[in-house]
Amino acid sequence: MPRPGLRTRSKRKVFVRTPGGRVVVHYRPKKTGPARCAICGKPLNGVPRLRPYQLRKLAKTEKRPERPYGGYICPSCLARLYREAIRSL
């Protein structure tokens, strides 16, 4: 039985073959779901699917695209917002 900290479904089981030939179970964190657009809900391109502790280690430019609202809304929604803003002037 695994130790108490690993008795959870929030970790995934990875079967690893050791050099001695045994197969043991390693418990690793699950991969997060993709970041999604705040307006339409589509997965965002250019945003890595990492756990928060791994995202903290990345540089700012590796976390999200370099455009207005990058990492928050998708480019098609941004284009639609720009069109609406220009039409309202």
Image (cartoon, rainbow, N blue to C red):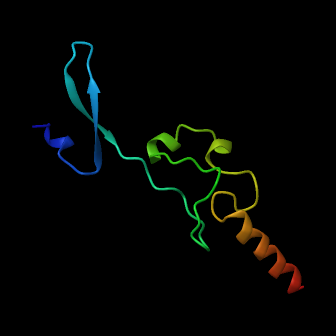
Relative image position of residue 56 (x, y in whole percent): 52, 42
Relative image position of residue 78 (x, y in whole percent): 74, 69
Residue 81, placed above or below residue 6: below
The residue most toward the left is 1
Residue 17 position by quadrant = top left
Residue 66, placed above or below residue 39: above
Residue at left 34%, top 43%?
Answer: 29
Relative image position of residue 18 (x, y in whole percent): 26, 18
Residue at left 75%, top 61%?
Answer: 68
* Quarter of the figure that contains the N terminus: top left
Depth check: 74 or 89 in front? 74
Residue at left 42%, top 47%?
Answer: 31
The residue most toward the bottom is 88
Residue 27 position by quadrant = top left
Residue 36 position by quadrant = bottom right
Residue at left 19%, top 20%?
Answer: 22
